[in-house]
Every structure is written in C-alpha cells, then in structure tokens.
Image: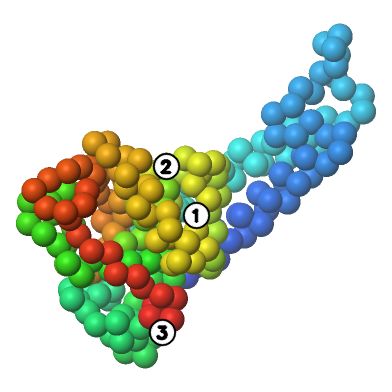
Amino acid sequence: MTDTAETLKALAVRQKKMEEEMEALADFLSQPGMPGLTGNLVDVEGFPRADIDLYAVRGARHRLAVLKTDYQEIRSQIEKELLALHAQGAVSVPRGESADRTKNLRTGASASADTEYALELCPYVPFAKIDELHEKSPASTAGFRLGDLVLQLGSVFIRNPNVTRTADAPGQPSVCVAEDDARGCTSVEEVFRKLRQEVESHKGENLCVTLLRNSDMVHLKLVPQTWEGMGLVGCRFTPVTQGML
C-alpha cells in the first residue's frame, strides 16, 4: 500500500473515533432533563440552573465544538489525499468499461488495494451508467460523457452504508441539496421510480449531478429542458445493480 493510502487509512481511523466521541457527547447533552446542544443554562429568573451540572455541560459543549472543527479539517485532508491518490493513477475506471470489469474494480479482483480503499470512501453507490448520449442535448451541454457512472441526481442517490455522514460536518464530497430533504434511496429500483419525477420537477432549473468518471467525482449542473430530441435530458440511464459493483 502506498504512503498516500496509508495516510488515508490513518485519517479514516481518526475520523471514526471523532464520530464516536461526538455521538457520545450529543447523547450526554440530550438526556432527559439536560439542556441539549443549545438550551439555556439559566432559569427564568436569570440564575444558573441548579438542576444540572453546569461545569459538565459547558465542558461537553466546548469539546463538541472543538471536535466539529477538527472533523471538518480531517474531511478536508481526506479529500486532498484522495485527489493525490487519483493523480498517482492508483484509481482508474477506463471509459466505456464493461459491467464485468466494473465488478472486478469494486471487488478488487483486478484492482489494487489502493483503488479498492479509495472507492470505499465514496459516499454514494453508483446506480446508473450513461451508455447513450446525444449531441446538443441538455446532458451533453452539462458535460455528461459516455461511460459516466451516476452517483447522485438532485435528491436521488443511494448512500454508501460503509461511509458515515455527519450533518454538522461539512466538507464531505456530497449532494448539493439539504440533508433534511434528501434521505436517499435504498435500491436501484427505488431510484428509477423517482428519477423521472426529479427530472420533470426541475424542468428549466439547475439540477445538481454527481458522476464517477475515471474514479474522479465530477459535479455538474444539469438543466432539464425540451430540445430537438426526445425527453428532457438526452441520455440513457442504464441501471447498475449492487451485484455489478
């Protein structure tokens, strides 16, 4: 394993420990009778509350604030290391790859440990492949390419269960929509039930799209609209099942 991959592994371990500590602190502050993350520490008359351990509460809140800042920094470091790994050529999905080859990439049958580890850090699971793309279509104008794997289209995506997201910790490669409005899908079948509705409801509007291209996460703005061809997008989304990844 390369130095970059070793660094990524160490950062992931630190990130996991931070998540566990933040969760424990949040649970402590949210116990019955506790003020929570932002509740008042004084009573209605303006005196310090006598029913809670003010020292412990302030200490927990301070520690949580420090951890949130550190967490943002470590996510930024992970992104930089991933970019470095991509630049080394350790992560590669040749354009136009067949389904069997894509499967090999995910399972590691023909991929290095570095490649497998980098893909495991991706927060989303590819649910479709662009295998037909028309010139001058909205998809082509947005920057789609043949062979792209679709990770997210608006609020439609499948979360990678092996990658933890924390709502209070920006910086992860992510969707462009609010987490409260995007809980993600649980299967490719569910994705394709929602895909048409998502496109049609954003006709003439920017729609955030995240693609996997040569193992790089590419963020685009798609504007679904009528054009000289059929549909509002002008490309074909071919389902990618879990077994193919």
Q: Is mark 3 on a helix, strand or loop?
A: helix
Locate the C terminus and report the quarter of the image it occupies: bottom left
User: SS at mark 1?
Assistant: loop
User: In the image, which is nearer the foreground, mark 2 or mark 3?
Assistant: 2
Name the spot of residue 213 as percent of width and height, x first.
24, 65
Residue farthest to the top? 45
Kindly identify the amino acid type of the residue bearing the numbered disc 2.
Answer: Val
Within 10 Å of the Cα at label 3, are there few (<14), some (14-19), or many (20+) other Cα atoms?
Answer: some
Query: SS class of the residue under badge 2?
Result: loop
Q: In which quarter of the image is residue 157?
A: bottom left
Task: Classify 64 as above or below 46.
Answer: below
Of residue 224 and residue 217, the one placed in the foreground of this image is 224
User: How many marks can you see?
Assistant: 3
Which sits earlier in the primary sequence, circle 2 or circle 3? 3
- The answer to whether any part of residue 113 appears in the image is no
Residue 190: give x, y in percent of width and height: 47, 61
Q: Which mark is residue 184?
A: 1
Q: Name the residue under label 3.
A: 107
Q: Where does label 2 land, which residue?
A: 177
**Given the image, on which type of amino acid does mark 1 rest?**
Gly
Q: Between marks 2 and 3, how big is the CA–CA gap?
A: 30 Å
**Which residue shows up at 86% across the image and 38% down it?**
32
Give the CA separation, mark 3 to mark 1.
24 Å
Which mark is in front, 3 or 1?
1
Q: What mark, if any, has residue 219 been given in the picture?
A: none
Decide: few, some or many residues near mark 1? Use Cα within 10 Å; few <14, some 14-19, many ≥20: some
Residue at coordinates 32% horizontally, 47% vertically from top-left? 199
Do we see residue 218 in this rendering?
A: yes
